[in-house]
Image: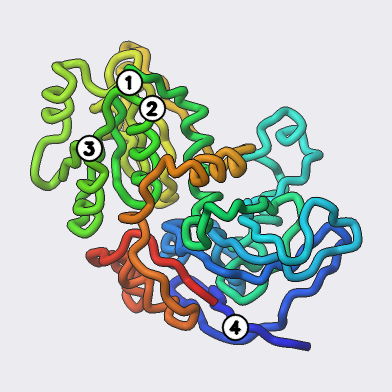
Amino acid sequence: MESMRSLVFRDIGKIEYTEIPVPQIEQPDQVIIKVKMCGICGSDVKIMQGKHAYKKDTVLGHEFNGIVHEIGSAVTSVKVGDRVALDNNPRCGLCDFCRMGFSSQCVELKNRTLGIYKNGGYAEYCVAPEDVCFKLPDEIDDITATQVETLGTVLNGMNTVQMQPWDTVLVLGCGPIGYLFASMAKNIAARAIVTEIDPFRLNIARQLNVPALNPDECDIEEEIIKLTRGKKADIVIDAVGTQLENALKYVTPGGKVLAFGMDDSSRAAIQPYYITRNAIKILGTYIGQNTCLPAIKIFEAGKINMKPFFTEVIPLEEGPGAFAKLGLDLDTLESIPKKAMKIVLQP
């Protein structure tokens, strides 16, 4: 059987560059994608730390796009040669959540997610069902197209918080997710503000041309009070997954907190009385939900400046070394200063 180059997640802290068999079509609705580019997601970093769901001996990578290489007998929406981005979360369409329009909670995700439970885009080829493939217009280059699914998750959050043109929006953390949220808030809200402690990413946050605050250098609550003339933020987005307690301090009475970032090692102590007395809405969203096509339209229209977002494109075989640049020492599993925002792998 023909083999291909890949990066296989073996266990916490261990990822191996190796060759594995090229995937084969096993169902009539499947397609084989020749991967062009695949971004390294913050979720991948957390998988390597053991702070996110994972499955051993799996090819990671869910931020990818490519060329349709082969199609199953029942495939009708794409053809060989099409450029496509992928939603890495195939839904079943049959469970109660799917049938109630809440497919982000599909009960089959735990068995189907590409790059976590099924082999993903850290390889030369990937097999996927037809219904997660989205054709790409020529206006979107292969590097930007790695972020279609990522922006789709952000848009699901945007749909949930229902951001208004008069809102002040505070985004906690300016990694890739925070950058996209802040970029969208710039397009919609009256004011966007971001926080970031990592020096590399703080510099990128400042390129958004919005107030970028470092919690190590100022009191964020005091600064938000000043910037809003005492009101605090209408919407606070935790793009890290560890900031819920802080978010509640920075949001105005009647405001909304979006718990978006994921870190299953984090715990928060909150006072229910404070939430009730101040009529604060705490919301949560997970992955995207019918938002990949809107993401493609936003990228096609050039609504977001993605130039500061991408740090570098590297060959697949250099993938293990990229985790240090993204803030994780794989030998010690300790966090270290970051030297990148988004790194993209090219098989």
Which residue appears at 48% of the width and 62% of the height? 143
Mark sitting earlier along the chain (2/4): 4
Q: Is residue 234 above or below residue 207?
A: above
**Considering depth in this image, is 77 or 250 the residue closer to the camera?**
77
Q: Amino acid at mark 4?
A: Arg
Residue under label 4: 5
Horizontal arrangement in the rendering, residue 76 relative to residue 319 (left or right)? right
Residue under label 1: 167
Mark sitting earlier along the chain (1/2): 1
The CA span between labels 3 and 1 is 14 Å
Q: Is residue 12 visible?
A: yes
Q: Amino acid at mark 1?
A: Asp
Q: Are marks 1 and 2 in contact (CB under 8 Å)?
A: yes
Name which quarter of the figure residue 200 lies in. Answer: bottom left
Residue under label 3: 210
The CA span between labels 3 and 4 is 42 Å
Residue at the right extreme of this rendering:
73
Front disc: 3 or 1: 3
Q: Are marks 4 and 1 in contact (CB under 8 Å)?
A: no
